[in-house]
Amino acid sequence: MVCGVYHGGARAVLLAVAVVLVLGKEAQQQQLSEGFYAGSCPGVHRVVRRVLKEAHRADARIYASLTRLHFHDCFVQGCDGSILLDNSSSVVSEKYARPNNNSARGYPVVDDVKAALEKACPGVVSCADILAIAAKVSVELSRSAQSGGPRWRVPLGRSDGITANITGANSLLPSPRNNLTTLQRKFAAVGLDDTDLVALSGAHTFGRVQCQFVTDRLYNFSKTGKPDPTLDGGYRALLAASCPRRGGNKTVLNDLDPTRPDAFDKNYFTNLEANRGFLRSDQELFSAPGAPTAAIVDRFASSQKAFFRSFAASMIKMGNVKVLTGGQGEVRKKCRKVNNGS
């Protein structure tokens, strides 16, 4: 009888622990909400939009660059603002990882957004949330005259991390030279599926990219001494004029979408169907043998509405990757360093 009471009590304790764990996880998820700053900083979106519009007057690339920063942040230890941290006595910055060094950009604009928000709502809005809002606003402001552009409500309430992970940035971020299998693996590692892969890659409908990321496709694909056979001949000639085999500047910028380079639309996908994807990682989505992603490319190429809907859903999904909330992190005073760092 005594044993029976003991086992029953143990089961009750285990059940209680399980309930607490489940509720704790749900509570953490619930802390991300669209209205997180409704009382503490109601004008947060307006402030971000104002600063970004000012920055865009001097830099036409900034919207695409800020969208990419959010992406590069979330793929390395989650959406915690770690990509923004500079080198310090306690931090080895992700900015100097191979995928980011001399490539990822927009940090001064993030600083400007943070300064404006600190003036309006001191100590309230995290840098991780700034990246998420900036990506959303950037896409909205890049919409073309022919379309309304994708819109979504950003769940907010992320805390900022106090560490960076340059090793993770070197190994986890998708590369412009990755094949489809590698891309799928890297996306799956953060809980994203093939539809997310194709939809989020659609952000390459705007922005610029350096010659160094395409020269192998033009002249020595997979060390064959020949061009990438999936690259349209006319498009290859156009790129070769900008990115010559010898004597060229590898940092020369090219439009990711040669049709409407600053508009957020479905043209990225029609370009892939025409074998006019700039990066290998882009064209792989359509041209890799037996690619399960090809049908998704076709669907988005034929329906901008379908692309916008999936892009918005995938941005929300990506923005929830391994987020820190509450006391799991901090709200940095400056995005480049942790509050107690030097």
Image (tube, rainbow, N blue to C red):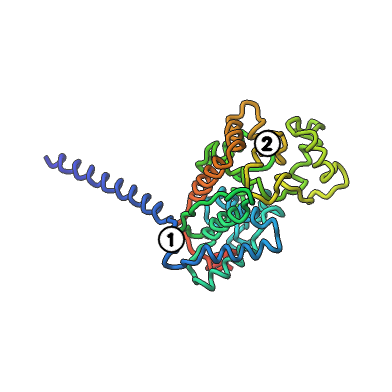
Residue 36 image label: 1
Which class describes the residues within 10 Å of circle 1: few (<14), some (14-19), or many (20+)?
some
Q: Is residue 94 above or below residue 123?
A: above
- Secondary structure, mark 2, is helix
Task: Tell whether 219 sits left or right of 166.
Answer: right
Amino acid marked by disc 2: Leu
Residue 337: tell me if it is visible.
no
Instruction: Report the number of discs.
Output: 2
Residue at the image position 64 percent from the left and 50 percent from the top: 144
Residue 212 at x, y percent in the picture: 77, 46
The reply to whether dot 1 and dot 2 touch (C-beta < 8 Å) is: no
Q: Position of residue 79 (x, y in %)?
A: 52, 53
Q: Amino acid at mark 1?
A: Phe
Q: Decide if residue 221 is on the left or right side of residue 63.
A: right
Image depth: mark 1 or mark 2 in front: 2
Residue 43, horizontal then vertical, whole percent: 49, 67
Q: Quadrant of residue 302?
A: top right
Q: Position of residue 305 (x, y in %)?
A: 55, 42
Instruction: Characterize the local packing of mark 2: few (<14), some (14-19) or many (20 or more) Cα atoms within 10 angstroms.
Output: many
* Extreme residue in the right direction: 247
Residue 1 in view: yes
Residue positioned most to the bottom: 119
Which numbered marker is on residue 330?
none
**Residue 318 sits above or below residue 164 on the image:** above
Residue 133: which quarter of the image?
bottom right
- For label 2, the residue is 272
Q: Residue furthest top?
A: 290
Q: Which image quarter holds the N terminus?
A: top left
Q: Nearer the viewer, residue 69 or 254?
A: 254
